[in-house]
Image: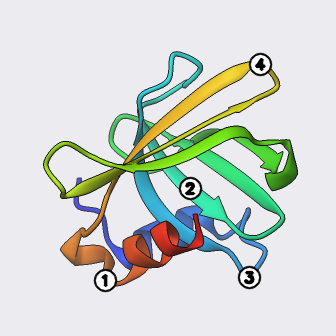
Amino acid sequence: MLLTKKKLSRLAAPYNEGDMSIGFAESQSIESISSKTILLVNDRQVIILFLNFFQTKVIDHMAYTRKDLVNEQLSQGFNGLDVVWRFTVQNKKWRFRILKKIVTLGKMQRELIERL
């Protein structure tokens, strides 16, 4: 399925507090229900929305406060086209691969990475 700005905004709308940066990421954590995720981030919290296989609906979500994140790291991917965001919270290790640019999402990816 094609990811668009409108589609991501619609899926994230029930969880969005208004001042949150939204972006698409691939979860590389064993804790994940699905590898396709939408990240919503602001200065206070992180919300992870897990998408179904076709990326048409949210099947589950998790929310954490930013102050609870431990060992938070943001690093360049191997090819320079993505970044890897890692953190630990409540003894769960999370790792997300975030593409720097997805044409159909406009500036959403860049804004998310800048917020991290």
Q: Against 10, is 59 above or below?
A: above
Q: Which mark is residue 39?
A: 2
Element carrying mark 1: loop
Instruction: Classify mark 3: residues with Cα within 10 Å, few (<14), some (14-19) or many (20+).
Output: few
* Residue at (46, 64) in percent of width and height: 23
Q: Earlier in the sequence, mark 1 or mark 3?
A: 3
Task: Find disc 3 in the rendering and name its residue.
Answer: 18
Depth check, mark 1 against mark 4: the one in front is 4
Instruction: Indicate left or right for 94 with 54 as reference.
Output: right
Q: Residue 19 at x, y = what percent?
A: 73, 82
Task: Find disc 1 in the rendering and name its residue.
Answer: 106
- Relative depth, front residue between 112 and 11: 112
Q: Against 51, is 91 above or below?
A: above
Q: Residue 107 at x, y = what percent?
A: 36, 83
- Relative depth, front residue between 59 and 71: 71
* Residue at (56, 55) in percent of width and height: 39
Which amino acid lies under the numbered mark 4 shown in the image of this protein?
Asn
Q: Which mark is residue 91?
A: 4
- The alpha-carbon separation of the residues under discs 2 and 1 comes to 16 Å
Q: Earlier in the sequence, mark 2 or mark 1?
A: 2
Instruction: Classify mark 1: residues with Cα within 10 Å, few (<14), some (14-19) or many (20+).
Output: few
* Residue at (62, 24) in percent of width and height: 93
